[in-house]
Amino acid sequence: MALIADAGLLGMGRRLGEARLGAVVLAGSENGATCLNGMPVAPGAVRMLGRLGRLQELEEHPLLARHVAIIRSTTVPNAAILISEHYEESIEDLIFLERLPESAIRNVAGQIAEALCHLHERRVVAGGMDVSHVLVVPPPPRLQQLQQKAGRIHIRLARFGLPLLSDDGRDLATPIGVAHAMAPEQLLAPPPLPRWTVPVKGSTSGRLAPCSRKADVWAAGIVLLQLCTGVVVSQCFSTREWLALMNDVIRDAADGPRDVSLFEGLARSLCEQTAAAGARLGRVRAAYGRLVTVAGECLRLRTKCRPSAPELLQRLKDDGYTREESDEDWSEMSVEEMGRIVDEEEKDEDRVVKSMPIDDVFFLWTLSGASVEKILLDRGVVKTKPPVLAGALVAVDDLQLTGNEEGRRFDAVITTTVLPMTNLREKVRSLNALTLLHSMEATAGRLPTWREGEERLPVVVKEKDVSYQAARMSLLAHLLASHSHLQQAQPALLQAAVAADVPPLRRAGVWRALLGVSPLDGDQFAALDTVSAHTSDRQLEVDIPRCHQYEEVMTSPSAHYKLKRLLKAWLEAHPRYVYWQGLDSLAAPFLLLNFENLPMALACMTSFIDRYTRDFFLKDNSHIIQEYLAVFNHLISFVDATLYTCLAEMDFFPELYAIPWFLTCFAHVLPLHKLLHVWDALLRAETSFPLFVGVSVLLQLRPSLIGASFNDVILLFSDLPDLQIDRILSDTRELYARVPRSCVHLAQRREEGHTMTEYTAAQLRTFCCPRLSREDLIDLVQREAVAIVDVRSPPEFHRGSIVRSVNYPNVDDATMGSIRTLLETAQANRHPICIVDVATMTVAKRFSSLLVSNGVCGVTMLDGGYDAVRNTPALIRVGSGI
Amino acid sequence: MAARGGAAARPASAAGNKTCQFKLVLLGESAVGKSSLVLRFVKGQFHEYQESTIGAAFLTQTVCLDEATVKFEIWDTAGQERYHSLAPMYYRGAQAAIVVYDITNQESFQKAKNWASPNIVMALAGNKADMANKRAVDYEEAQAYAEDNGLLFMETSAKTSMNVTDVFMAIAKKLPLGAGPEPARDTVDPSQSTQRASGGSCCK
């Protein structure tokens, strides 16, 4: 049963364990400025959205709490909510409740130093660290006693990295961190307070000097001071009192030596608060003198005199700090002991949810009907004024509001709010744990079956179903983790597993696998120059700011920057291609799914374009596009001859509407949430799939197309109505399975197994139906799934003909006398009708045109005429067989 | 929507008023606001982040003059030059054109000069007039150019809707209303003139 844990071990990120989800409100700054292009600058909350990934990369470190997501608020203007891994107790609570043994101080200090070291090495500043941000990770219940006895406390640093997230505080309306944690240099020279400051309780307003690594060390010193004295600064001093104290202490120290420390001055004031504090400090000083010295060094007035984080860590290590990775060593355990642990875990009814990756948990949490914003508003964490009091005095256009700025501000408490998880826990408890367990070896690669009909529900319904998603995510985590191994043994397994749908949180991995992209494929990115000027720069500059802008993340500056780099990298890697408008839309899904991994985004995009839109982005692509559109037109006639005729009669050709469809594989036509579902299906299919999607779109619009005028029809295509993607996909799948592959043969993308005459686009346009290859005909004849009409002259026919073919030489006889039943039966069974002619196909063209204009569907011509099959004995009967 | 209704049922020739249909194309650099102008004219809407146009979009709108009702069939074309070769059918047979440039972008004005065709009614529209504080193209310069080349000229703003209807009305007034509803088929293909123009001299 411990197998459940696998999802966490499969590289899907940290497991939930004993953690909770915490939410912090970040008020974005705004200044109403506009960009060079006249568009308003993205508000602070939006600017922060795109930067989370950079922080998430760091969080594999065991001493850092994971930032799970950042959401833009919809009720409060310009606020973002940061969701992070959270634990109910922090060091602050332990100090306050006097539960922090003096023996644990060095260990805690060491862990803090180690976390800072890790961040600083990666050029990230923690920013405003406070005792309340140092969370205590509770051990699993079975280890509680053991840990307590050893006096060990595991910590995880939360709410770090806000400077990076907010561009050094520029995008935040509030300062980073509380006043108590601020270093003297941050307090001494605050820049003038901006006008648009949001008043926030418990902190000074306005932006202060940026956070720095040395300010982090100061904050660590303040944490140490509190650990040593047992006094929680924020409990004993108001912001005003603390600032006054700092003022006094700094003034006293100003005349001191260069490396003067504020430790003693601050410690004295803290010890005045309670008698116990002085006694505790005395004891700590006696027992851990080195530690107090180190704390003093951290609190030196001058930044240059403070140690760096690595120096701090080294000093604590010299003093005897070591970090234990884990309290249990499985390698030294007996089987019985392990069995006991597993049995104990079994008893925990929340073991399933605890074993899920924390990101999955938050995704499922949102599915279980919870809204972070509503919780924050209900609890009064965010307070807004009623809309009637929030109106502006003057509104210019739709965007600029002037007057009554006060009314549109909101109050927010900057504490972490724990998100309740009762609903989700109960939901997961009710799941059959077995649906989350799949052993491909044990089931010989058989995929689990879902509840009756569950798979056939609309995708949007399935995407909101907690239990379905939990089970699917778990299955795909397994399949993706073992993909490279399974690919050899059972190449179709992943394909089959995602036939019904792709769980949103696994989409990036699934797409990579389906596109055949390996991690090594990202290597070329580093060699590409994505910075130097490129001929497409000006076009990219005007296109990127309007690419999929209804999608929140796409509006953030970091998304714009990354999309530009991705496109430039692609152009750089493919010198024979150029930038066509629309390429930006096509690249966007790959960017969004690989936001922090541009090399992977590039590899996926390259593979995708090679498979589905190859050569479309050549400088001169007209012959490629024209051929594609001609084949598309043939497919329309095959599937729906009446519609084809109707459109053809009003000279309404695919050139007028379908270029953006196929050039961008619908990325410029469909909104992203629909596009992703289309591409989920597309990636399992071959290169011709987009043609079928196109026909399915036409079929959905059919009622508005038949009998309409040219203008009506083109208006409809210029402003496509809301399309039902589920219906389009089911139609597409049906057509894709039914239509012989040679009917959508593209000369430019030679497919294996078909010998087809290559025609130019101009020649193809003279046909009004697709051609059938010899190979497809053989297959169809064997399955008795084709009606064959031979239009050659009777003598030729009697000399040799295809088995079960019917001779109908009098093609101008529109009554279809002898073949009427044959055609009707074929159409009723949805079988293709194959017209066989001599190699020139002149008669076949005339006859196919007649059939199509009479509304006969499924008409094809045998490519190369009878000559193509003359030497295929299995297909031929010689002499008059009738 | 009004436009669509109008397209379905041609307005009856009330009080001897006849309806004329004309094909109008919008030309000009990327992101100068061609689609925004059309959207403002036809639907009265404005989107700050109007998506780029691939190929072309088609809309219709009807304006009433004293002597006739003019129905515009508007082809809003892709700004990126590459697309011009892909679908010349958008331009073919157009009787009127609005060449749009962005008053904050000198290059877009230079590109606008490449579009010229003697046989059709043309207007030059300097769009984004609401951003006059970032102006890079002088009003007088553009006006002089338009006068020299016999173009109608207006500065417009799709955002504030300044002069948007006016530029279409001005074109309607200059169109040969006597020619009747049948579009003349012998008009010059502007896409050809741009090819000539890109060869060097500006065709006038």
Image (spheres, coloured by chain):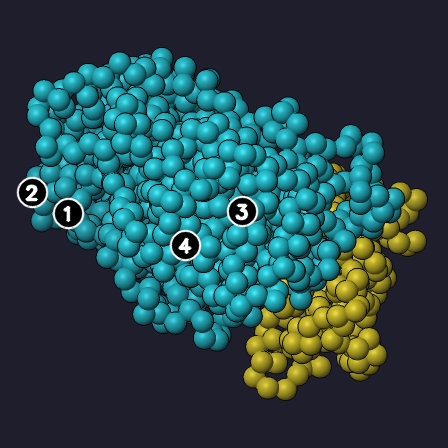
Chain colours: A cyan, B yellow
Across and down, in percent, residue B188 comes to 66, 71
Q: Which residue is mark 1?
A: A869
Q: Is residue A707 above or below residue A433?
A: below
Mark 1 and mark 2: Cα distance apart in space: 8 Å
Secondary structure found at label 1 = loop
Mark 2 and mark 4: Cα distance apart in space: 93 Å
Callout 3 touching callout 4 (CB < 8 Å):
no
Q: Which residue is mark 3?
A: A267
Q: Earlier in the sequence, mark 3 or mark 2?
A: 3
Q: Is B202 in front, or is A6?
A: A6
Q: Residue at x 46, y 62 (%)?
A: A306
Q: Amino acid at mark 3?
A: Ala
- Count neighbours of disc 4 (C-alpha within 10 A) and say few if under 14, some if 14 to 19, many if 20 or more: many
Q: Earlier in the sequence, mark 3 or mark 1?
A: 3
Across and down, in percent, residue A441 comes to 12, 28
Q: Which residue is mark 4?
A: A294
Q: Which residue is mark 2?
A: A873
- Count neighbours of disc 1 (C-alpha within 10 A) and say few if under 14, some if 14 to 19, many if 20 or more: many
